[in-house]
Amino acid sequence: MANKYTISKGSAPVEKNIISLSYKGLIDACQFDEDTFIEWLDENYYDDVSSGEEYENELITKEIISPDGTKKEIEIPVKPYYNSFEDEINKAVTDLKDFDRDDKLVIAYWKTYSDGSCASHTFELNEREQFDPNKIKATGEYDLVTGYQYGDQEFYNDGDDEGWYGSIEFEIYLKIDNSLYHLYDFQMSEIRNTLLDEDLEICSSNSEKIFSFLKNNFFDKEFKFPETKSPFDNDKKISEKLNTQVKNFNSENKRWIEDTLVKYKPDSFNEVAQGKTSAYIFREELYDNKKMILLNISKKDLLNKNGKNLEQIGDTVPIQDIKKIEKLIYFYFEKCIEWCENGDVSIIENYSGDPLLSNKIKDLAKKEANSVFEDNELMEHNNYSILLYCQGVFVSSIGD
């Protein structure tokens, strides 16, 4: 006789993968259409993804069901088969940089589900043996638990995993003329429209001309590998000073802010000036025809009440899509880091006062997106909403 032990089902699964394509392969797959590329990834690489439940700090907490039905939560150590997803992306991009040709791309993508559960896992132990939960270990790939072991024996995957309402996000790293560039998924439509405006035929036979054009006319900055040390490590005092200045300005100049932002309401969304500034405005519309934009103003322009250099960063996004809002804010925070490295920005700090470290910007973007999303749900009758930031610090917002 054998006793069966079960690791309970987990949260909704996550799928991750890193692939390589040629210039021609990317164009053949999607012609720079985001939705088409997402469908192509789902159809062509479904069997290659790492899928499982996310873990942190090489530990995962799981419920163990004993043969008598009793349940107990335990912490299970995870042994990564690969490095973290981010480290594996950096490794692939390093290999891309060292590659002797320019016609390769690295694509990192992940699929999340809004509902569902990871599979349960079972293991049968001879009844003469005493069960020891300390013998349970997990295997990790790309920050996901993909399997469990008891000693040197595998737990059986029960195949009862479920996932509903899945969505794929991706990032592309490319090498053009020996320079590296980084492309977000939401920029695909912008590239497609730019190429069409220039009457460049989007076909694989035209790939070299297309990517040469993108280098010279679309990408404004080469990709840099993440730094282990944050560019903001040196100065919380500067951050506190900036927060105080922005707060005081906001309370004393509300009318000027409103008069400046109202110029960017729906009719002028596509006419935002392209300046060298550092503050953002979000415009958000709650349903299909209600969107959000993000503009940017420098500390100097803000304190001098110069609203002529406002710059839109990223695309207009729908308010009901929190994932796109999060990506837009993440894109903004990355831009803030670039400005800081170039000497344009002193420091960036989020609402709660934690320094905006480069290795925390994804978590901060998620927190910020949730706050923005919740605020705009409360204003469901607004036709639009605009948020203004200055060097990473919230200034004000308007809606109608």
Image (cartoon, grey):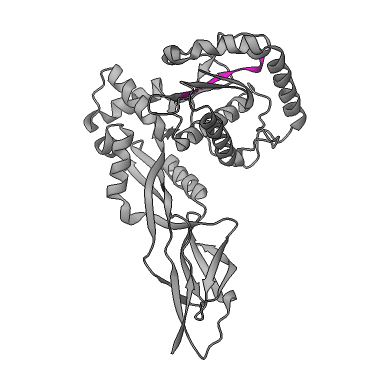
Residue 274 visible in the shown view: no
**Left or right: 49 with respect to 36?**
right
| Residues shaded magenta | 292-300
- Looking at the image, can residue 287 be seen? yes
Above-or-below relation of 300 to 90: above
Name the residue rendered at 39%, 25% in the picture: 215
Q: Position of residue 66 (x, y in %)?
A: 52, 78
Quadrant in which residue 248 is drawn: top right
Compared across the picture, whether 364 is left or right of 138 comes to right
Q: Nearer the viewer, residue 271 or 195?
A: 271
Residue farthest front in this picture = 381
Q: Residue at x 53, y 12 (%)?
A: 262
Q: Is residue 239 magenta?
A: no
Place residue 244 in its image quadrant: top right
Q: Main secondary structure of the magenta part?
A: strand
* Residue extending farthest right: 237
Q: Quadrant of the N terminus?
A: bottom left
Q: Whole-percent x and y of residue 13?
A: 43, 55
- Spot occupied by residue 230 in the image (x, y as percentages of width and height): 65, 37
Q: Nearer the viewer, residue 51 or 97?
A: 51
Say if 389 sits above or below 147 in the image. above
* Residue 52 placement (x, y as % from top left): 44, 58
